Amino acid sequence: MRFFIDLDLFSNLCYSGLVEGLIKGGLSVRRTNKPFSATPVDLTVEQTINLNCASSKTGITAFTNNHSCRERWSIINSCTGDITSRLEFNVGIRQKEDVSRDLQPHRIKTDHRQFEAIKSQIMNTINPFSTDMSTVRLTNIGSGKRTSLETEDSILKVRDNGEKARLQFIKECVEDPARFSKPIKKLPVKTFSSECCKFTRKGPAGKLHDVVVDRNLMGRTLVLALEHGKNVNMGEILSYPNVPVPPSLGHNDGKMASTTKSTLSQRLELIGKTGNPVNPPTSVDAVIVDGMFLLYLLCPVPSTFGKLAEELFKKLCRLQDKQVHFVLDQFFSPSIKDAERDKRCSDGNRDASYVIKGPSQNTPRDFTKLLAVNSFKESLIEFIVHYWSTSPCLGPILCGKRIFVTEKSRCFSFQFVDGQLIRKTEEHLVSYEEEADTRMLLHVVNIQSPANIVVRTADTDVLVILLGNIYRFKKDIHIWIEAGVAGKNNLRYVDVHDLSIHLGEKMCRALPGFHSFTGCDYSPAFKGKGKIRPLNILLKNVRFQEAFAALGFSFTLENEVIDSIESFVCAMYGHPQLKSVNEVRLEMFMKAYKTKHSKDPLLEVKGMDGSNFPPCRKVLLEHICRANLISSIWNYAGVKPISNEEFPRKMLFSPEKNGWQLDNGHYTIRWFSGDMSPTTIEEIVFNSEESDTVKNNESDGNQDEDDDNDDLLSQDDSEEEFTESENEEI
């Protein structure tokens, strides 16, 4: 009480010198002349006391754990704050807050602007009190994303979990008074933001890399056995995969190997151009647009979903064509494309659920990344169709055009007639195909002839599908593909009809099987082989063309077809004189690992990546089955479905019998059937006579084969370099 009395007396005296000192920072301590280095007096006193009371060994632990010290510090800290504030008020340094300041005109404008911003933000989110909202799952009202069951359980039980932790803390403090001063463990809580975290793949020593393959261990071990035991059947050993994931088709983490598909379309374009650029069509009757391709081109992305739907509608209306077909994907689960979609969705949230409730909802910042999420694309497509159907103001923009848009298995047409926007269901365009690549073919087949059609896409699959099915089109239908982007100066046209004439019918029919076999979105690619080198082999061999053309029409493939494709793989790996991939594996293995120094077998052992070997026959058969199923999808793309959702099961082959397996509701690659490696020693051991015969045969033909292979490899390498230079010119 006496401090407050002294403050009143001090304020009455009003010593000018002291007041000026207080204004300059008299209630603080500074070690330098810098104003930002000032420390309040009470804090300085507290730090000084702590310093004096601290122990050189334990610091201030004993001081802070003392109950009396903490109580005294709380009282002193409150009193010093009151005294300082009272002193500044008395001498006029600090003034009491003016409650009427919020009524100033500039303040009213600021508050109104902030209120409008908050109101706009609320209007752009989902209404949580709407009757349309799901009462089963929690939904993020900002992004429209539904939570996972794990996150929902964590959010709904956060109060109960906190109460349990509180009671547990009280119980521990009663049992041990020292527990009060110890740290409290933070409870793990999953929220909406937790699901936005990116998942990074760990290195080879991490837990995510379950499959670890030592590239040289198997080779060195077997060579030692061969050098010392002289009775190991290497051909039998190499007829097995010997690893869980074949290095020639997959990665150590179990993912599919991929290749650049665009090199195939670029090479085919070169064949069709024959030195002359392809001119665009003079007149166009219909344009078919890959919907996902157009969505990826949106830059910048409109701020709301309503503006996004309007921008898409305007873009389609700007096309100078009578008919515009906006073809989009639909999604099934499980799907043979699950592996590729898991790869594209880097955050591991491909199955997350999203909802779009209205046109004023903001588009997410990571819009392009979310296009890899199935539920987001489904909600987006459903919203776009609904918005176009319920927005009469879009009708006059059509200007006599007719727009077709697909949603799931259905197809709708929009036309402006007598001042009204009419939506009609097109039964003849109903499709149960999953990808827009194959759905577009149905639209091509159903366009009335004669017609000039332009397909707007950048996907190599579309070019391959069109060429593979061009013999089914009417003669007076002419098709171009418009690829590239004008803004990047790579816009070009591909005359599909003219290209098919240059390739020939056999080659066109073989392209779907070839493309699916050498790597596409559904199946893995051969590491290091790409598309150009295998294509050059295919162009020169009619037998290979006939074999690939036979894929996709029968569940059971003839042995002649399988043998021809196996010979194609042998040629692709530089051994056209061999007919078996197991023989090629043995040949390449012996050349890479066999040493010339018998005293030290490891002296000249070369390190070779297992991906340089072709897959064994076990793996190759599964890969051929996958290519057969994919080819069947592409070959029947334009066929009218017979019976609704049973159509894929009746017309296509079963994925479980053609290279895939069902794992936790998703299709994953089945790399091979049977044992991974030999199960008994007897399987890989020669008898003495067979061992001597094999040794003599190898010594006689080794040198000649090595020379031939070196010449072939050098020739292939130069050919690959030539084709790569051509691609760079494109």
Image: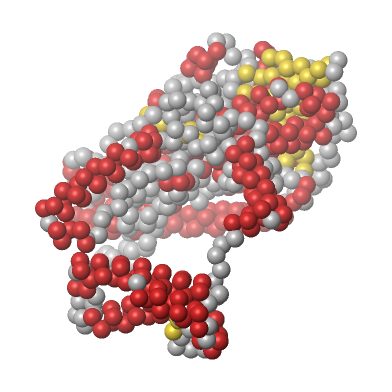
> 535 or 158: nearer the eye?
158
Identified at 59% across, 43% down, the residue is 364
Identified at 78% across, 34% down, the residue is 314
Q: Is residue 469 visible?
A: no
Residue closest to the far top: 643
Identified at 48% across, 17% down, the residue is 649
Residue closest to the far right: 282
In-image side of 135 versus 403 (left or right): left
> 551 or 590: nearer the eye?
551
Identify whether 30 is placed above or below 362.
below
Residue 301 screen position, x and y as percent: 67, 44
Identified at 68% across, 49% down, the residue is 113
The N terminus - image quarter: bottom left
> 702 or 201: nearer the eye?
201
In-image side of 33 versus 267 (left or right): left
Identify whether 471 is placed above or below 603.
above
Picture quadrant of residue 220 = bottom left
Residue 217 screen position, x and y as percent: 29, 57
Q: Is residue 306 visible?
A: yes
Residue 382 screen position, x and y as percent: 61, 26
Picture quadrant of residue 453 = top right
> 136 or 657: nearer the eye?
136
